[in-house]
């Protein structure tokens, strides 16, 4: 892996080394490594089926790799039966693709699920108050806490999923394609919310996305998955300086340029120009 932005001496709440994942003969990851810095929003990109979700699932212990090391907040995730492995799950929140809300529970009750699971000693009144607070924190009106997922728009469902991901005041937030299916205004609003929450709550955010606008708007660094590995991780200008065909096509193609035009970042523009490609 090429880590393009060196000089960091802080903590790495997520460390993946030499990861291998395979389903039968189908090898998804081979010797994949990635270090996520404390307090960053790291965007994870790659073509469809390159294993972004499988990587996320390996980090949070839902997928058992066939080789490698996964360390989250100092805990070895490949020892899932340790007592510590159970506690560690309360220190992150996950927004799965599609929200993954329980359809028979209201939004508030959905948010209460992890609270009940990890803090059964919290009294029901307080638990419901915490849930309503998380609903508001996610940008929903408090009344949304009493609605069922089927009564919500796509954007509201994402926010409800986010409220549940934030239920336990996590240190890490995992977002799997949070803006997929949202209209551009809804997607931009969700991006701003993610950035705002990251700043105010001091979160480290692992964000899988295909959305170039999101990458430009809120990611500190981007990790690119191709050829079964993280082939590079860095800021967008750093990635643009690489001559990898997928990276150039992705960031310097027409959609990449349109996303940049919307953002208007002179540093990235000059990196694009220095590649000498028009992207047209
Ligand atoms: N449980 C599973 N059993 C068998 N194959 C799986 C399983 N989960 C994922 N895969 C395969 O692993 C590959 C990577 O899947 P993954 O969902 O991680 O891709 P992705 O990069 O997130 O794709 P997309 O951008 O389309 O969401 C795919 O070929 C998928 O079919």
Image (spheres, helix red, strand yellow):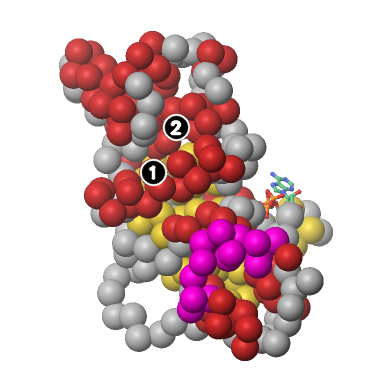
Q: Is residue 5 above or below residue 218?
A: below
Residue 89 shows up from this direction: no
Name the element at disc 1. helix
Q: Quadrant of the C terminus?
A: bottom right
Task: Choose the circle earlier in sequence order: 1 or 2.
Answer: 2
| Residue wearing tag 2 | 159
10 Å crowding of disc 1: few (<14), some (14-19), many (20+): some
Give the left or right position of residue 234, taking residue 167 as reference: right
Provide the residue span drawn in magenta.
255-268
Answer whether residue 187 is magenta in the image: no
Figure label count: 2
Q: Quadrant of the N terminus?
A: bottom right
**Residue at horizontal 73%, vertical 65%?**
254
**Residue at horizontal 26%, vertical 17%?**
128
Give the left or right position of residue 173, taking residue 91 as reference: right
Q: Is residue 278 above or below residue 109?
A: below
Residue 108 drawn at (x, y percent): 36, 18
Q: Name the disc covering residue 193, or none.
A: 1
Residue 231 shows up from this direction: yes
Residue 174 drawn at (x, y percent): 46, 48
């Amino acid at each position: 892996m090429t880590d393009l932005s060196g000089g960091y001496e802080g903590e790495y709440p997520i460390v993946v080394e030499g990861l291998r994942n395979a389903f039968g003969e189908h090898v998804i990851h081979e010797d994949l490594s990635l270090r996520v810095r404390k307090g960053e929003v790291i965007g994870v990109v790659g073509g469809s089926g390159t294993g972004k979700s499988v990587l996320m699932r390996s980090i949070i212990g839902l997928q058992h790799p066939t080789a490698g090391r996964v360390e989250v907040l100092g805990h070895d995730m490949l020892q899932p039966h340790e007592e510590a492995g159970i506690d560690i799950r309360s220190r992150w929140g996950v927004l799965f693709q599609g929200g993954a809300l329980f359809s028979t529970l209201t939004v508030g009750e959905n948010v209460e699920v992890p609270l009940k699971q990890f803090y059964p000693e919290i009294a029901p009144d307080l638990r419901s108050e915490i849930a309503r607070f998380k609903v508001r924190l996610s940008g929903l009106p408090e009344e949304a806490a009493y609605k069922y997922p089927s009564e919500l728009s796509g954007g509201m469902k994402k926010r409800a999923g986010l409220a549940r991901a934030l239920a336990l005041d996590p240190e890490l937030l995992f977002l799997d394609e949070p803006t997929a299916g949202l209209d551009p205004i809804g997607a931009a609003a969700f991006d701003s919310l993610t950035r705002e929450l990251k700043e105010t709550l001091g979160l480290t955010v692992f964000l899988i996305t295909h959305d170039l606008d999101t990458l430009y708007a809120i990611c500190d660094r981007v990790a690119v998955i191709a050829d079964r590995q993280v082939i590079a991780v860095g800021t967008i200008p750093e990635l643009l300086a690489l001559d990898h065909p997928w990276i150039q096509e992705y960031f310097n193609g027409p959609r990449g340029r349109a996303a940049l035009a919307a953002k208007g970042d002179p540093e990235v523009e000059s990196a694009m120009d220095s590649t000498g490609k028009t992207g047209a």
